[in-house]
Amino acid sequence: MTTTSTLITADPGKQELFIVREFNASRELVFRAFSEADLIARWLGPRELKTRIEKHDNRTHGSWRYIHYDDAGNEYAFNGVIHEVAAPERIIRTFEFEGMPETGHVSIEFLTLETLEGNRCRATIQAIYRSVEDRDGHIVSGMERGVLDSHSRLDELLDAMN
Amino acid sequence: MTTTSTLITADPGKQELFIVREFNASRELVFRAFSEADLIARWLGPRELKTRIEKHDNRTHGSWRYIHYDDAGNEYAFNGVIHEVAAPERIIRTFEFEGMPETGHVSIEFLTLETLEGNRCRATIQAIYRSVEDRDGHIVSGMERGVLDSHSRLDELLDAMN
C-alpha cells in the first residue's frame, strides 16, 4: 500500500483554502464513503470523538447535520445544505459549526473526486469563507488535526472495504 | 420620498462583491419582499423579463429555483439552497445560473437587513464566488443592470405596499 499525505493550502489574504488527498481506492468507493451516512460516521472527525449523523439528505437541494461527541458528554455540531450531488464526481455544500458565539459564519465546500491510475483517487476540497478571518479562525480551531485524523481513518475504512 | 442608489463594490483580486441599497420601508416589509414568492416575482430581475417561481421553500435548509423569461420564449433559470433564514435580519443561500456551459459555478450570498432611522432599511448582499474569474464573469454578464432594475422595481413595490 502506498502511503499518502494530506496537503492543506491557505494562501495569505485569501478567503479560501484547499485540501488535497489521494486514496488507494476507486473514485466510486471514495464517493460512497463521502455520501453514505453509515460510512461517514465511521471516518469523519478526530479519533477521540464519535460521530452521530442527525440528518443526511444527500441529494441536490438536500441538507445535513452531524454531531461529534465524546464519552464526557461534550458535543460539537455542524450543519449545512447540499447544493449539488453529482455522483461520483462532486458534492457542493455549505458548512457551519454551531459552537460559534453567533450564527452566520458559513462556508461553502466543493468536493471534487478524480480517478487516478492504479485504482486510486484524488479528493480536492475547496472551502470558501465569508472572510480571511473566518478561514484563519477555522484553521487555528484545530481543523488540520481533524482533517488528518479523518483521512487516516478513511484510509483504514477504504482498506477494509476494498 | 428620498431617492437612493445601489452601490456595488468588487475589489480587484477578491472573490467576493458587495451590493448595498437603502429602501424607504421598514426592515420587516423589505424582508417580506425578499421572502415571499408572490412578492419576489413582482420585482426580481430586469424590467423586460417576467419571473416564474418554480420552487421557493424559504426556510433554513430549504431551496429555491426561479426562471426569468420573455415573450419570445427565452428563459434564464437560477437555483440554490437556503442555509439560514433568520427573519427579519438575514438570509444565507447559494446561487447558480443554469445557463453556464457546465454546472458547479456556485456562489453563496449573505443578505443582511438593518433598520435605519425614519422607517428605512439598509440591505447588504455579500456574494462569494469560487474564483475571481467567476465573480468577474458574473459582473460582465449584465448583473449590474439586473440589480439596478430589480431595486428600482422593489422601490415601486414597497411604495405600493406602504
Image (cartoon, coloured by chain):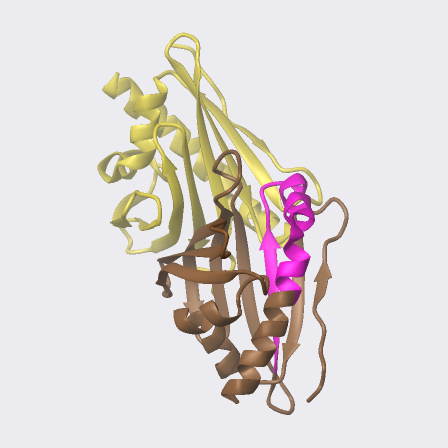
Chain colours: A brown, B yellow
Q: Quadrant of residue A6?
A: bottom right
Q: Residue furthest bottom?
A: A118
Decide which of A66, A27 is in the foreground and name it. A66
Is residue A123 visible to the viewer in this orientation of the structure? no
In the image, is residue A130 part of the stretch drawn in magenta?
yes
Return the x and y of residue B29 as percentages of the image width and height.
Answer: 30, 23
Return the x and y of residue B141 as percentages of the image width and height.
Answer: 52, 48
User: Image quadrant for the C terminus of chain B?
Assistant: top left
Decide which of A118, A154 is in the foreground and name it. A154
| Residue depicted at 54% across the width and 57% down the height | A109
Q: Residue furthest front?
A: A72
| Residue depicted at 33% across the width and 55% down the height | B75
Where A89 falls versus B57 (above or below)?
below
SS majority, magenta: helix
Q: Quadrant of residue B128?
A: top right
Side of A92 where B60 appears, left or right: left
Decide which of A93, B140 is in the foreground and name it. A93
User: Image quadrant for the N terminus of chain B?
Assistant: top left
Side of A138 where B36 appears, left or right: left
| Residue depicted at 49% across the width and 38% down the height | A104
Q: Which residues are magenta?
A: A121-148
Where B101 falls versus B114 (above or below)?
below
